[in-house]
Image (spheres, helix red, strand yellow):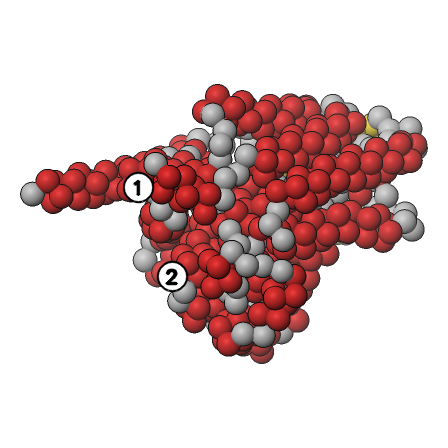
Amino acid sequence: MSRGNMFSSQLLKFGTLHSVAFVIRLCLVGFGIYQDKTMVVKYTDIDYHVFIDASRLVTQGESPYNRSTYRYTPLLAWMLSPSIYLTSHFGKLLFVICDVLSGVLLYHILTLRGLSSDAACRFSALWLLNPLPIGVSTRGNAEALLAVLVLSTLLCLQLKRHFTAAFLYGLSVHMKIYTVIYALPIALFIPNHKELKKNYRGVFRVIQNLFSKDLALFAVVAGAVFLGLTLTFYCMYGWDFLQETYFYHLTRRDIRHNFSPYFYMFYLTVESEWSFVLGLVTFLPQVILLLFTSLAFYADLPLCCFLNTALFVSFNKVCTSQYFLWYLCLMPLVLPHLRLTVKQGIGLLLLWFTGQGLWLAPAYYLEFEGRNTFVFIWFAGLLFLIINTVIMVQIINNYVPKRAVQQKKKMK
Amino acid sequence: MLSLYFVVTVLCFIFCGASQKDGVGCGFTSSWLESVVLSVKLTKQGFHSPPEPLQAAVPVHGRYHKASSSGGWERVIIEPPRLLLRSEHCDTVDPGLPHRVVDAPCTSQNQSLCSWLEIHGLQVPNMSLELPVGDSSLIIPVCAVTSLVSLLCSAFLFRAVWKHGIF
């Protein structure tokens, strides 16, 4: 009886949280329709119009890349084709559903990692009730799709469903190339499952284990999905597809102001002959750090993916606010393991927002008032990198690994 | 950077009457063409539309120019717009100089070409904008400080990972 009660109250809580999250998003989608009709400043993001236009082209049998600035996989345009046949808001509904689904996935991963249902709800609420993902998905950005793919890959890996995980991972790399940074941690994680439990490690054993059956299966399936989709779309849309979906993002060096610490340097040297050398200088710390954290933390895959993403975004040549969602969706998986007090946590959060604010103010004056604030934006970008570094270091220093948590529980 | 609205005010009264005697064809009479006035207004807010005879508002987004050696602002000249006229139901006939007939898309949606009458000799001053640009004399300090900060941050992270990572 009491167990049944407990279960229903937990379900209610889980159900309430996700329903509330869904309703909030639906209301905002509705509000967006109203604002777009009545106000000069539009709610819907320009990217959403790009998606819809590309989707229309696809349904007419044309290449989505005939729409300028469409720089995504054709799969996205295909997925959104009901927007053309049913209602133009279909895409937003899909993104909103993915957003809530990400919350469900977070909840499941958290409970698998040993959290109680209540605690798991509390932490997944950090994503579900967070204004940033709410705003991004209701304004029609597709980041939630990636969150679902990444989180479901992690869940499947934890459940040892390597085939499904590989399929999802191949799909996510196809959708957004940045997810390739999870390849090394996953490749180290899969074959060393058992060893990790035995608490036995060693670099040689780790390398030896790389030749395992599970990993080979994962690599073959993920590779086949990725290459299959790439080949299919290459045959359909030719070079445009490769250029817009992959090469553009790999070689992108945006000289318009963005959060990247390197923005001003690249802007000033865009035509200089050291441009290539500087590109390399900035690429190296990013790659070395990614390799190093992958080796150090692969045993705790969510932590490792979170750190890899945060590092990648912070040290990237281009950084816009959508990129923050890439690590924000992994944050609820890391936070329960932090030794930080609530006060310290809020302090770090405020620090991050201060960094944002200090960047946004001069950016606003440059963008809208025509003031020359380049130097301030550059300083703010560097400060933002420093702040991000401090936060990442705090997270690394105060992280209590899963095993230690379990041992503590046993001792109690 | 600096979103500006470039409001092209075209003061004309289009009456596509049947005054073909004037020698211009069914399009526009030469005396009427002389009365055409074009004015250009550059406003910053842009989101308003006073009830003028005919208005075309073109958003201009002033973006990065090449960094200059002294930083500051760079003047950008916006050349006056061309005014093309066409009456709806009949072909525009070449009226002779100073105006001439050019081919341009029929409407913004319909990309097939139509004959348009380009009005010349309008007294429109050049407009200009001042756009902030980067200061290329700062290249060396900017590169040095950026690289240094990025290196220090990497080192700081490296140390933390080394200390707490499990190898």
Question: Which of these two is toward me, B107 or B12?
Answer: B107
Q: Report whether residue A385 is seen.
A: yes
Hey, which quadrant is residue B148 in on the image? top right
Residue located 50% across and 29% down the image: A340
Is A321 on the left-hand or right-hand side of A114? right
Q: Which residue is mark 1?
A: A116
Q: Amino acid at mark 1?
A: Ser
Foreground pick, A406 / A112: A406
Q: Check disc 1 and report its element: helix, strand or loop.
A: loop
Which quadrant, please, contains the C terminus of chain A?
top left
Residue lying at the far left in this picture: please name it: A1
What's the residue at 38%, 61% (across, down)?
A: A159
**Distance Cα–Cα, label 2 vs label 1:** 18 Å
The residue closer to the viewer here, A333 or A357, is A333
Mark 2, residue position = A159
| Amino acid type, callout 2 | Leu
